[in-house]
């Protein structure tokens, strides 16, 4: 599908999934003093933003170096998005994860919680489809990271006020939207593949 600024922003928000990351951030930051948590969240969001921004600018070179075509990236990206969407709709049973004793740095908050393989593939896909609109995709990524920062800074309050059930229900709704986006991407990728296939 041909993305607009709005659709690219929504797609990036669905992929980075700030609501779904609330439990991860809250659990990981438990050992961090409350007065430092906001600073850590902002730092991790900026690291994720920097990494995804780098992928936006070196993505084309990466694709050429790996001899990957735009069609293969689109089909592969659609499959990855579909699998992520299924995980959002049918989340695995919760597991007791140990609370880290030290302040997290880069892992697991910036990578892979925010800037995971799916987010990297998505920014690569956006730039490969319309490299001339790179600044538009940078703006979409900036809005996405800002939204992630706001949601995660309010994570503990949201968890208390809204409750995990409401957050989980909203995440499943976003998963349904992501399924539709991934199926549309797959259909367009297969059409492009059929058109380029030798007769």
Image: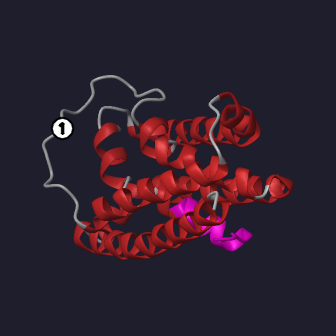
In the figure, 64 relative to 140: above or below? Answer: above
Which residue is outermost to the front? 199
Location of residue 179 in the rendering, given as x and y in whole percent from the top left corner = 41, 71
Residue 17 visible somewhere in the drawing: yes
- The residue that appears at 29% across and 59% down in the rendered structure is 87
* 93 shown above or below 42: below
Secondary structure beneath disc 1? loop
Could you tell me what secondary structure mostly forms the magenta stretch?
helix
**Nearer the observer, 4 or 79:** 79
In depth, the one of 42 and 193 nearer the eye is 193
On screen, 36 above or below 102?
A: below
User: Can you tell which quarter of the image residue 61 is in?
Assistant: top right
Residue 8 is inside the magenta segment: yes
Residue 50: quarter of image? top right
Residue located at (28% from left, 43% from top): 27
Left or right placement of residue 156 versus residue 164 in this view: right
- The boundaries of the magenta stretch are 1-13
Residue at image coords 35%, 69%: 171
In the picture of the structure, the residue carrying the numbered disc 1 is 97
In the picture, the quarter occupied by the N terminus is bottom right
Question: Farthest residue toward the top?
Answer: 102
């Amino acid at each position: 599908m041909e993305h607009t600024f709005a659709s690219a922003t929504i797609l990036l928000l669905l992929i980075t999934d700030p609501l779904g990351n609330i439990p991860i951030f809250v659990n990981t930051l438990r050992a961090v003093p409350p007065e430092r948590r906001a600073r850590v969240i902002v730092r991790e969001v900026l690291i994720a933003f920097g990494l995804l921004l780098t992928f936006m600018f070196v993505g084309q070179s990466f694709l050429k170096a790996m001899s990957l075509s735009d069609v293969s990236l689109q089909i592969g990206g659609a499959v990855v998005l579909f699998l992520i969407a299924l995980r959002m709709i049918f989340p695995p049973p919760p597991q007791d994860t140990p609370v880290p004793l030290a302040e997290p740095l880069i892992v697991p908050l910036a990578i892979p919680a925010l800037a995971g393989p799916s987010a990297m593939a998505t920014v690569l896909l956006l730039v490969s489809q319309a490299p001339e609109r790179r600044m538009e995709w940078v703006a979409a990524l900036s809005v996405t990271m800002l939204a992630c920062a706001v949601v995660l800074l309010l994570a503990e309050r949201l968890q208390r006020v809204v409750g995990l059930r409401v957050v989980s229900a909203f995440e499943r709704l976003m998963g349904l939207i992501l399924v539709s986006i991934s199926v549309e991407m797959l259909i367009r990728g297969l059409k492009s593949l059929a058109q380029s296939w030798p007769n």
